[in-house]
Amino acid sequence: MSSASLNILMIASEAAPFAKTGGLGDVLGSLPAALANLGHRVVLVLPWYRSVQSVTGRLRLSRRKIFVPFDGQMLQVGFRSLDQNGVRILFLDVPNYYDRPALYGEQGEDYPDNAERFGLLSRATLELVRHIGFVPDLIHAHDWQAGLVPVYLRQQLWADPFFANSATLFTIHNLGYHGDFPPETLRQLGLDSTLNGFDGLEFHGRISLLKGGIRFADRVSTVSPTYCREIQTEDFGMGLDGLLRARREELHGILNGIDLKLWDPSSDPSLAVPYSAESLAGKQLCKEALQREYGLPVGVETPLLAMIARLDPQKGIDLVLEAFDSIMQRGVQLVLLGSGRPDYEQRLSAAARFFPEQARILLRFDDRLSRKIYAASDLFLMPSRYEPCGLGQLIALRYGSIPLVHATGGLVDTICDPQQDETRANGFSFETLSSRELLATLDRALRAWRHKSEWQALVQKAMSQDFSWDKAARDYVDLYRISRGEA
Ligand code: ADP
């Protein structure tokens, strides 16, 4: 395969540390820099959200303007530019769309103009790169928020010489979010009404921006090999399995990595005491520090379970609720950090009220606290109903918190149970999604935890595993070349 360096354009709605609600933000926080590190030129386009301004703060990035054809007019759009870790980040600055308290919505309600907000992100990106003279060899669009990028290219810019040599890759980070809107939205997005059909963006009487990305990109990928297979089945395909099967020759699965520098217990400033696989004493002190901070009985003789997740049915919260009392009867402590569906927040808090000496439910999004919990915990619960890749379990491994997972999607590709293979084991997993299986697996894990020296060896092995971005970034470059027809 050719080794020439590529001009790569990335479009997404999140990238850590500027904006993050989940794994998408982690991926876009790391992959662009990993690609730049391999010698490619990378431009990343993001909205200039309010949260971005709190991160860039004192940098005072100057605002420039361009005009973008959108919603039947030439819209004046601001942008700001920042060079970081070898990546040029262009922030699209449209205050009435992006200067808001949240990324996608508030109090469980999506913002009603999300189609325009992210349609503009997609359309304006293509004018922005023209404006700065960055001719992309590969345009990599992520999730429904950037799903219209391949659509605009195919529908409006197909004859534009600037993009004549640009191939597109669309990555599905979560098939559960379709970005679906009323068909009339097409007009506002400046798209032809004929796209409201089976061969276009139509999905059960609405239009889906996710479907647009899958349908019109040259290649499609998702974030683990197992999820790539699963989404082609009716059980996991969320209604798009037919289209995905039709495109199976152009569909790929590349496992995410994590940034080993950003997630490192030996240098993480959030931790009470740093530690490493070679020197684990600090992990016990982190556990005691968290117990003290949250008023739990202090001591390393009680196993500490953690869960850090969006409170969404995808994450198997109902299983945890069902098993809550039984988990507590095992005499463990549980610290759960999450935010999301108000009914889950309320039911988890209510369940924990009966166990003031054992359980803490912390309802917020808090990166610093999440790090303290990864470090303090012995076991990390992730009973996901489905899981495209999952980063929680990879971060947990890195911090020596042993994952206990439902065997689905990326969790199958990253977590091995001793019952499958004793020598490769790095966690515990169960096949059938039920609270009974969850509890039976917890019992196995707790039995293993009591054998101190074996457990310590397991923790050390987990912490030493390499789920870094290097391999994934190389896999993406290979796929970029395949998308360009070079391979
Ligand atoms: P998803 O993208 O489906 O939410 P992942 O496991 O891929 O799930 O990624 C979740 C990311 O978000 C991890 O970095 C995790 O630590 C973080 N996270 C989830 N909930 C919270 C929270 N309440 N506070 C801080 N970080 C969180």
Image: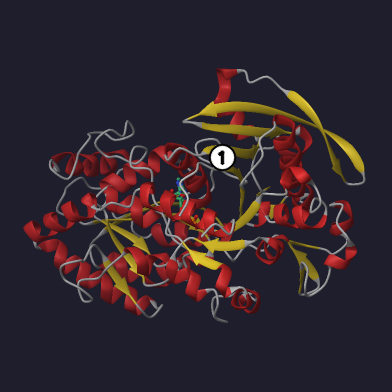
Q: Residue at x 47, y 42 (%)?
A: 35
| Tally of numbered discs | 1
The three-letter amino acid code for the residue at tag 1 is Ala
Note whether residue 364 is visible: no
> Between residues 317 and 92, which one lies in front from this camera angle?
92
Q: Residue at x 13, y 40 (%)?
A: 279
Q: Quadrant of residue 302?
A: bottom left
> Between residues 338 and 296, which one lies in front from this camera angle?
338
Q: Classify 121 as above or below 401.
A: above
Q: Position of residue 487 (x, y in %)?
A: 51, 60
Label 1: which residue? 19
Q: Classify 172 as above or below 104.
A: below
Q: Position of residue 151 (x, y in %)?
A: 75, 57
Q: Residue at x 13, y 43 (%)?
A: 278
Q: Position of residue 313 (x, y in %)?
A: 53, 67
> Between residues 229 and 418, which one lies in front from this camera angle?
229
260 on left or right of 53: left
- Considering every residue shown, the one lying at the far left of the view is 453
436 on left or right of 232: left
Q: Classify 207 as above or below 365.
A: below
| Disc 1 packing (10 Å; few <14; some 14–19; many ≥20) | many
Q: Quadrant of residue 375?
A: top left
Q: Classify 424 as above or below 28.
A: below
Q: Quadrant of residue 256?
A: bottom left
Quadrant where the N terminus sits is bottom left
Q: Residue at x 39, y 51 (%)?
A: 257
